[in-house]
Image (cartoon, rainbow, N blue to C red):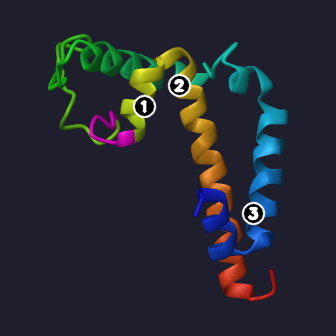
């Protein structure tokens, strides 16, 4: 059973159609990010998220697990912070793809995942979708 068949059988055709429309709308809204031409860079994403992802990428690709970040302030724990997401599997995929492209895809995938979750929650509580 393929993943699409399992998804369709488990959640129904409405969820599959919604997922496809959602992915198409996200791709239409952020075509440069989807194609890997550009990434998000405003506010916290550019000042905080991207440098952390790049630091994690450099360490993981060199075979090290980053425990400490000497580049922030006079040094701060890296592995012990919740917002660095060192042990989150999606962060490791970003490191493999590269922070330039992967971080934008990471955010868009979470946007699609969150949209599908809201659809399923609305369907659960209303029973009519």
First-in-chain label (2 vs 1)? 1
x then y, percent, for residue 102: 53, 25
Q: Which residue is mark 3?
A: 16
Q: Is residue 14 above or below residue 108?
A: below
Q: Label 2 to label 1, Cα distance in Å?
A: 7 Å
Residue placed farthest to the bottom in the image?
127
Q: Label 1 to label 3, Cα distance in Å?
A: 25 Å
Identify the residue at horizontal 63%, vertical 23% (top origin). Answer: 40
x then y, percent, for residue 66: 19, 23
x then y, percent, for residue 97: 48, 21
Q: Quadrant of residue 84?
A: top left
Local crowd size for mark 1, using a 10 Å CA cut-off: few (<14), some (14–19), many (≥20): some
**Do callouts 2 and 1 mark residues in contact (Cβ within 8 Å)?**
yes
Left or right relative to 48: residue 67: left
Q: Quadrant of residue 3?
A: bottom right
Secondary structure type for disc 3: helix
For residue 14: magenta?
no
Screen quadrant of the C terminus: bottom right
The mark total stands at 3
Mainly helix, strand or loop, the magenta region? Answer: loop
**Do callouts 3 and 2 mark residues in contact (Cβ within 8 Å)?**
no
Q: Label 3 to label 2, Cα distance in Å?
A: 25 Å
Residue placed farthest to the front in the image?
1
For residue 85: magenta?
yes
Q: Which residue is mark 1?
A: 93
Identify the residue at horizontal 28%, vertical 34% (top origin). Answer: 86
Q: Which residue is mark 2?
A: 102
Q: Is residue 66 above or below residue 126?
A: above
Local crowd size for mark 3, using a 10 Å CA cut-off: few (<14), some (14–19), many (≥20): some
């Amino acid at each position: 059973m393929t993943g699409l068949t399992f998804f369709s059988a488990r959640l129904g055709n409405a969820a599959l159609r919604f997922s496809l429309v959602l992915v198409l709308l996200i791709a239409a809204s952020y075509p440069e990010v989807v194609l890997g031409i550009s990434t998000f860079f405003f506010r916290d994403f550019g000042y905080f998220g991207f440098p952390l992802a790049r630091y994690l990428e450099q360490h993981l690709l060199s075979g090290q697990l980053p425990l400490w970040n000497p580049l922030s302030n006079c040094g701060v724990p890296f592995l012990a912070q919740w917002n660095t997401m060192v042990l989150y599997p999606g962060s490791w995929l970003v490191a493999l793809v590269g922070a330039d492209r992967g971080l934008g895809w990471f955010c868009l995938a979470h946007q699609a995942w969150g949209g599908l979750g809201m659809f399923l929650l609305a369907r659960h509580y209303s029973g009519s979708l």
